[in-house]
């Protein structure tokens, strides 16, 4: 039995086919080869076309099939992971009404802050576990306020993964985890928040049917099955945001366990059994994939918008013609601390951990007679690691104190220098695993289809491929303190 995982990323779509018995990858592919474009019509805006995601899904699956490593007719279930917080709007005929306002778009910050004050800060935090901030609910309110002709045509709102599932099955569903990431869910009332709905004036009919994360979200349409080379009727049995899914793929399911990722954005994601929240909503709490009213599992999420996106920018502007591996090798030529060059990597929209401020990206202390290409690449990696440390200290202040962090060996964690800098900056060992979001989505589909008795069984064969421990002979603290002083100056 084979399982198909689809990961709708900001940069690309990746698919993997996994053997259910061994839990091993049979084949995988992604599309496109270069990062997908983000439309920024105005400063702070960020949009992508849902149709682009669908076309990329078709292309990625075509590439995967072309490897001829499996019989596509043996694929028995489909799982979907997706970039979180994006707003997708469709009419009654399931036509997309506008481009998706994606996770790093900052236009709705003021709308969310006003809602936070009006609904009541304590009310929001204790019921929603978050400020409405710049999340999906605030993005929908922006459309209602600024594009009333579009809002009037909406039949259903959804997140990016819901849209791909709709294209596959013709059905539109959501989950408690998805509603919570949009800040639509009231954890105390265990339902869609009446306060949010009433404040923004949303109609309850805009929301899809609520299903468990691990459950049937529809069956593959015959017409789509023919296009994809799959069997008609295959169920979509799992949908989750990329960060809860990344945690699942690392078997981070129980209180105290922590996962990290450093893709386009950077995330530290810890699991708690408490309805807890940060008083300033700098870190966020959402329902994890295994959340249930009777057994609460919450994902406490620190998000940094400018991680892989910052490194990509550095590559495109200072490393033209170089691969990321070459960038990483070049970065190792510069010394610890990059000879004083410091980078604040906050140029990808409003940062939640900085109270939704748009600080921008900064290079500080450039010496035209000293600093080289190698210094730039190392300083960017160090600046990203410092931003993780800054956010991790906030998580520590909220009771999250892991003894180890699990991460997939992908994206920035492919750089030994970055992985070591991350560990030395945070002071916490990192276990690296050979997996990714598409594999997690495939195994999630197996859980939803009943192939595995539990999430733990689905990842019973997962073993770390590397353990990186802090090097106490490397004193990174002065670098961090100088970086922190620069950030404090920008925030003042």
Image (cartoon, rainbow, N blue to C red):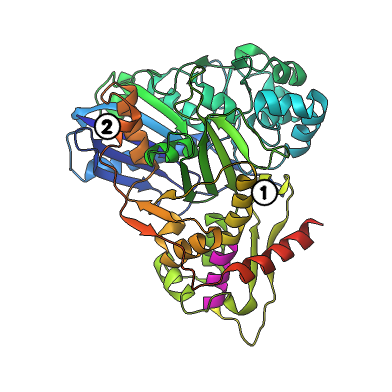
Up/down of 153 relative to 463, above or below: above
CA neighbours of label 2 inside 10 A, class few (<14), some (14 to 19), many (20+): many
Looking at the picture, tell me which residue is in the foreground, 286 or 148: 286
Up/down of 272 relative to 195, above or below: below
SS state under label 1: loop
Up/down of 25 relative to 72, above or below: below
Looking at the picture, tell me which residue is in the foreground, 251 or 175: 251
| Quarter of the image where one finds residue 236 | top left
Q: Quadrant of the N terminus?
A: top left
CA neighbours of label 1 inside 10 A, class few (<14), some (14 to 19), many (20+): many
Q: Position of residue 361 (x, y in %)?
A: 67, 61
Residue 310 visible in the picture:
yes
Tell which residue pokes out farthest to the bottom in this image: 369
Please give the residue where the numbered disc 2 appears in the rendered image: 3
Q: Which region of the structure is painted magenta? A: 374-383
Q: Position of residue 423 (x, y in %)?
A: 49, 60
Q: Main secondary structure of the magenta part?
A: helix
Please give the residue where the numbered disc 1 appears in the rendered image: 349
Q: Position of residue 282 (x, y in %)?
A: 68, 42
| Quarter of the image where one finds residue 17 | top left
- Real-space Cα separation, disc 1 to disc 2, in angstroms: 36 Å
SS state under label 2: strand
Q: Quadrant of the C terminus?
A: bottom right
Residue pictured at 74% horizontal, 15% vertical: 198
Rendered image: mark on residue 38: none
Looking at the picture, tell me which residue is in the foreground, 322 or 116: 116
């Amino acid at each position: 039995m084979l399982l198909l995982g689809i990961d709708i990323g900001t940069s690309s779509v990746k698919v993997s086919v996994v053997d259910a018995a061994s839990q091993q990858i049979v084949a995988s592919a992604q599309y496109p080869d270069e990062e997908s474009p983000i439309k920024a019509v105005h400063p702070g805006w960020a949009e992508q076309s849902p149709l682009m995601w669908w076309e990329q899904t078709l292309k990625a699956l075509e590439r995967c099939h072309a490897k001829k490593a499996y019989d596509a007719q043996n694929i028995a279930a489909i799982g979907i992971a997706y970039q979180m917080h994006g707003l997708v709007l469709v009419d009654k005929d399931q036509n997309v009404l506008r481009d998706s306002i994606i996770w790093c778009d900052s236009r709705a910050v003021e709308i969310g802050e006003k809602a936070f004050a009006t609904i009541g800060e304590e009310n929001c935090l204790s019921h929603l576990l978050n400020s409405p901030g710049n999340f999906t609910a605030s993005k929908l309110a922006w459309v209602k306020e600024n594009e009333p002709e579009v809002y009037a045509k909406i039949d259903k709102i959804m997140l990016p993964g819901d849209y791909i599932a709709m294209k596959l099955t013709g059905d539109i569903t959501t989950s408690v985890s998805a509603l919570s990431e949009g800040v639509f869910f009231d954890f105390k009332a265990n339902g869609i928040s009446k306060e949010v709905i009433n404040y923004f004036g949303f109609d309850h009919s805009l929301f899809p049917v609520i299903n468990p994360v691990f459950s049937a979200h529809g069956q593959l349409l015959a017409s789509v099955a023919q296009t994809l080379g799959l069997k008609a009727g295959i169920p979509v049995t799992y949908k989750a945001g990329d960060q809860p899914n990344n945690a699942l793929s690392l078997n981070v399911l129980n209180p105290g366990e922590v996962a990290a990722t450093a893709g386009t954005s950077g995330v530290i994601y810890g699991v708690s059994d408490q309805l807890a929240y940060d008083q300033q909503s700098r870190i966020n709490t959402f329902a994890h994939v295994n959340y249930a009213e009777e057994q609460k599992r919450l994902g406490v999420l620190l998000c940094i918008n400018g991680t892989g996106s910052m490194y990509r920018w550095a590559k495109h502007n200072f490393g033209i013609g170089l691969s990321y591996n070459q960038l990483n090798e070049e970065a190792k030529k510069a010394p610890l601390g990059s000879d004083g060059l410091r980078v604040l990597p906050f140029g990808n929209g409003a940062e939640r951990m900085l109270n939704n401020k748009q600080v921008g990206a900064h290079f500080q202390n450039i010496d035209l007679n000293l600093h080289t290409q190698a210094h730039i690449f190392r300083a960017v990696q160090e600046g990203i690691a410092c931003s993780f440390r800054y956010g991790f200290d906030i998580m520590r202040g909220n009771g999250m104190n892991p003894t180890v962090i699990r991460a997939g060996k992908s994206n920035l964690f492919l750089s030994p220098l970055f992985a070591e800098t991350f560990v030395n900056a945070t002071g916490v060992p990192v276990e690296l695993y050979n997996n990714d979001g598409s594999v997690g989505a495939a195994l999630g589909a197996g859980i939803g289809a009943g192939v595995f008795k539990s999430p733990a069984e689905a990842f019973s064969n997962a073993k770390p491929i590397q353990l990186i421990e802090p090097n106490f002979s490397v004193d990174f603290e002065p670098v961090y303190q100088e970086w922190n002083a620069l950030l404090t100056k920008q925030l003042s």
